[in-house]
Image: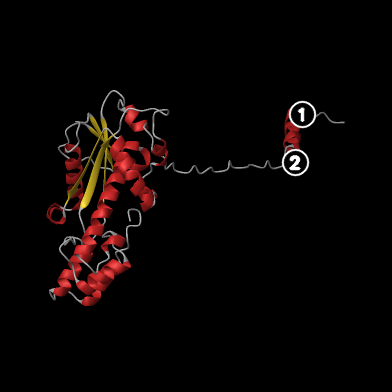
Amino acid sequence: MGIITPKTKSSFSRLKSTKPKTAKMRFSKPTVTRPISTKPTLLWERKLGFGERLIAGVDEVGRGCLAGPVVAAAVILPIHDAKSAPKWLKEIKDSKLLKAEKREELFPLIQEWVTAHCIAAADVLEIDRINIHYASHLAMRRAIQGLQHQPEHILVDGKFIPADLPCQATAIIKGDLKSLSIACASILAKVWRDRLMGELDAQYPGYDFKTHKGYSTPIHNEALKRLGACEIHRKSFAPVTAQLDLLSGLVDPGLVNSSLEDSPPDFAEF
């Protein structure tokens, strides 16, 4: 028998290593989708000293409407804990997630319970003059200024903080889903504006403002084509502007119809 040299042994080892290996099964970890919580809490308020400082929450409603004012509400919550909190507080959510009946039920309860609250608005003329973004901020600023107590910090729903607020503020995207103060403010603003649009429906019959609250819906758009714009329509909004141009003979009727059809209702707010 010949002597196996290191080289030959190495070659033999390589030959042995060529045996097929059993493939190991790799399983990816299942993706767990966590639902977004719709239960606002005091987390943001507590971060800013809730209990020792007055924290206000402010929200607006009606930005996307073709008619009517933009309305804002500001709220300062009282100091409370799980034991002293009223039972109905567990039902507070972003106003858009509540049925109209529940919002109406919560409206007076919030007003009576909170330390301070104020509801304010910017009208159609102001919206057309300074645009809806700044008009929304104007309404928020008025609501803050109207509070019975001066807040030491303000939680603002959205990406932007209005100018000239009386104290420091923090903007919270989807704040009405996260902050209890903002959620309470959203309910006050929504109920107040919905009631106002019901009253305006009687003053301007034919548009059905009590149903769609001024948002762009098929019924509202059809009425706008049939009756034209009224005093509470926002003339700076494209579908309304197009209808006004049609009446003035400045545009083709087909373009106006297309503009109205391309303006779906803002179901997130409606």
Residue at the outermost top position? 52
The disc labelled 2 sits on which kind of residue? Lys
Residue 13 image position (x, y, % from top left): 74, 34
Quadrant for the N terminus in the image: top right
Residue 30 image point, x, y percent = 57, 43
Quarter location, residue 89 = top left
Q: Is residue 254 above or below residue 44?
A: below
Q: How is the image coloured?
A: secondary structure
* Residue type, mark 1 in image: Thr
Q: Residue at x 31, y 44 (%)?
A: 107
State the residue at coordinates (38%, 43%).
93
Which numbered disc, 2 or 1, marks the residue closer to the eye? 2
Local secondary structure at mark 2: loop
Q: Position of residue 2 (x, y in %)?
A: 84, 31
Q: Is residue 63 visible?
A: no
**Residue with the mark numbered 1:** 5
- Which residue in the structure is indicated by mark 2? 19
Q: Earlier in the sequence, mark 2 or mark 1?
A: 1
Q: Which label is found at residue 59?
A: none
Q: Characterize the local packing of mark 1: few (<14), some (14-19) or many (20 or more) Cα atoms within 10 angstroms.
A: few
Quarter of the rendering containing residue 23: top right
Distance from the alpha carbon under mark 2 to that under mark 1: 22 Å
- Judge the density around disc 2: few (<14), some (14-19), many (≥20) Cα neighbours within 10 Å: few
- Vertical side of 225 occupied by 269: above or below: above
